[in-house]
Amino acid sequence: MPIKRKRAWDLPDSAATDAAAFYNRREFARLFAAGSVAAATAAVPFANPAEAAEAVGPPANDPTKGIYPFERNGAYTLERPLSTEKLVSTYNNYYEFGSSKTIWQEAREMPVRPWTVEIDGMVEQEKTVDIDDLIKRMPLEERLYRHRCVEAWSINVPWSGFPMAALVDFARPLSSAKYVRMETFLDKDVASGQRASWYPWPYVEGLTIEEATNELAFLVTGAYGHPLPQQNGAPLRLAVPWKYGFKSAKGLVRFSFTDQKPLTFWHEVQGNEYGFWANVNPEVDHPRWSQATEKFLQSTDDIGFAASPKEVPTQKFNGYGEQVAHLYKGLEDKYGVKLWR
Ligand code: MTE
């Protein structure tokens, strides 16, 4: 359990709205009576309650809707307000549905049940687990995380989910495994972007075992106190907030343990621009733009041609150096991880 670090910029309690009031606890009791779900008592502060009401929320038939919100882990705090749910649910990167930011309508058509997750490769025993069985087994919590896209915009999001370390524990990898390779769903019928043959589908991402078991690596099942909408990666996505956003793969269906560094989607598409490590680093520019600053997107007022979002300095490891810098000590020369690539 991480140590709680209270900081001067913690959101004041006056900024909080009790999201618990919106969600049905009886459904939770019925579905998860035998589970080990954390008490659902979190309060979710919305940066702008009017926009929260207009957000494009969870899939209508998500069977876990009654278990949210999860108790917030107070160790992870933000220096700026949360981005609005409307912004986060309508301004997305999800190339499976196209390369524009407005894919949410098409993504909403994607079925998220039934959904199974494969665990294979260098593990004691390969297995397939149903997403709802997996969620029941995991220690659930809410975390407020920064998200910094390689395109130099950022958002602050309340994710719900469980530490990736718990999944690694459940998978029982062999000691010879060095990496976790993650794979996204493949279904050209529902995801029109996957019909674009110039991309190497499915989307693949990877972490070292040390990164995957770092306290910050989080597997996300929900946001803003309810199940994740498809456009944000339902029913399961990664959040690794010290890395550029493309590492946080959505729509996950497979975790493979391996001793080979995975060839990741964007590295395969454009290896000189998108690497395996992708740690946020303001000192190393993208070949086509600066990474020194970012546009912080708080609400939908901050997007579009007329918008002038707040430009803020980018922090090394996106401000999470305290938790992750040690992972890269001594590896810098070997792997060149000083470079974001
Ligand atoms: N995962 C998949 N499967 N496909 C994608 O195109 N885009 C990535 C990441 N995960 C992407 C993905 C990028 S570039 C970013 S910035 C984030 O998702 C965006 O997450 P959001 O839309 O929930 O803000």
Image: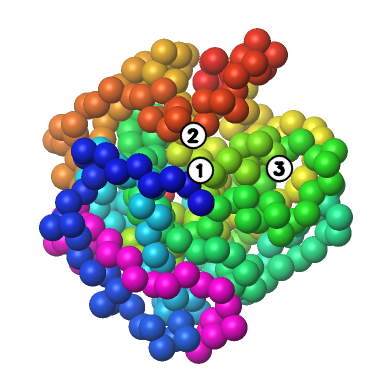
Q: In percent of the image, x 24 and y 26: which residue is there?
A: 312
Closer to the observer: label 1 or label 3?
A: 1
How far is mark 1 from mark 3, CA to CA?
15 Å
- Left or right: 91 as drawn, with respect to 203: left
Residue 43 on the magenta span: yes
In the image, residue 202 sits, relative to residue 142, either above or below, namely above
218 left or right, relative to 289: right
Q: Which residue matches tag 1? A: 216
Q: Are marks 1 and 2 in contact (CB under 8 Å)?
A: yes
Q: Which mark is residue 117?
A: none
Q: Which residues are magenta?
A: 30-58
Q: Mark 2 = which residue?
A: 323
- Side of 263 relative to 145 (left or right): right
Numbered disc 1: secondary structure = loop
The structure residue drawn at horizontal position 16% and vertical position 36%, both measured from the top left corner, is 307
| Residue type marked 2 | Gln
Q: Position of residue 225 (x, y in %)?
A: 35, 65
